[in-house]
């Protein structure tokens, strides 16, 4: 399989998956050397399994990200349409201004500013929506879009935070299980 070839694991049925044969004239490996070879083969099998699983997971994640990006673009365009058509109708909370800020902050702010602004803007949106008394009656399109935008952005923010935590946990797990061992090389300290 591709994962076996990528990590240098012998292909099943290729003859060298069992104990390697000792050529005439060579010393028999010690039990410690045999155990070390078995551990190395087991690690390669685990790595191949992990690689095969991670390819599937990676495809699912990439497709999910593409779907969220397309949904985000559609929601972004819909936001400008809603603001253009219903932005002048009365609303008891500044939802129009909040929607404009939500649509523009990713374009205006640098990356570090976006990370700081996202939770603050989300909390402001929840505050405005929860304190609104008449906007759902006087301007239902603007209000319903604000609810949808708040839910979408909150979901994206929570998912990105969870994904970051999962990736960090995965790196620590891989390191703890010896899958990220780095052998000394020219870049290592002397």
Image: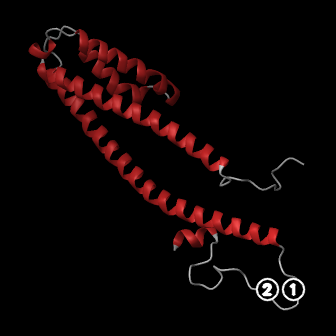
Q: Are marks 2 and 1 in contact (CB under 8 Å)?
A: yes
Q: Is residue 94 visible?
A: no
Q: Residue at x 46, y 33 (%)?
A: 161
In 3D space, how far apart are the residues under numbered discs 2 and 1 (Cα atoms)?
6 Å
Q: Position of residue 141 (x, y in %)?
A: 13, 24
184 relative position to 93: left or right = right
**Residue 3 vs residue 93: left or right?**
right
In the depicted structure, whether residue 37 falls above or below residue 185: below
Answer yes or no: is residue 57 visible: yes
What's the coloring here?
secondary structure
Find residue 22 and name its label: 2
Q: For mark 1, what is the residue?
A: 26
Residue at 56 percent across and 41 percent down: it is 169
The local crowd at label 1, few if under 14, some if 14 to 19, many if 20 or more residues have their Cα within 10 Å, is few
Q: Is residue 39 left or right of residue 110?
A: right
Question: Residue at horizontal 13%, vertical 9%?
Answer: 134
Secondary structure type for disc 1: loop
Kindly state the secondary structure of the residue where label 2 is placed.
loop
Q: Residue furthest front?
A: 31
The front one of 149 and 101 is: 149
Q: Quarter of the image holding residue 33?
A: bottom right
61 in relation to 153, above or below: below
Answer with the quarter of the image where residue 150 lies.
Answer: top left
For this rendering, which residue is in front, 117 or 28? 28
Give the x, y percent position of residue 103: 32, 27
């Amino acid at each position: 399989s591709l994962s076996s070839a990528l990590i240098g694991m012998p292909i099943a049925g290729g003859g060298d998956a069992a104990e390697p044969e000792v050529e005439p004239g060579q010393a028999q490996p010690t039990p410690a050397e045999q155990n070390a070879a078995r551990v190395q083969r087991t690690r390669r099998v685990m790595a191949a399994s992990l690689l095969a699983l991670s390819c599937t997971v990676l495809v699912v994640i990439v497709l999910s990200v593409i779907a969220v990006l397309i949904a985000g673009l559609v929601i972004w365009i819909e936001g400008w349409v809603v603001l253009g058509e219903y932005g002048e109708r009365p609303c008891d909370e500044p939802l129009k201004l909040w929607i404009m800020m939500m649509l523009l902050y990713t374009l205006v702010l640098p990356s570090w500013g976006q990370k700081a602004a996202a939770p603050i803007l989300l909390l402001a949106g929840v505050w405005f929506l929860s304190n609104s008394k008449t906007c759902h009656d006087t301007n239902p399109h603007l209000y319903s879009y604000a609810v949808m935008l708040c839910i979408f952005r909150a979901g994206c923010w929570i998912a990105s935070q969870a994904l970051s935590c999962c990736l960090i946990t995965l790196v620590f797990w891989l390191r703890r299980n010896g899958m990220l061992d780095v052998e000394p090389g020219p870049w290592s300290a002397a």
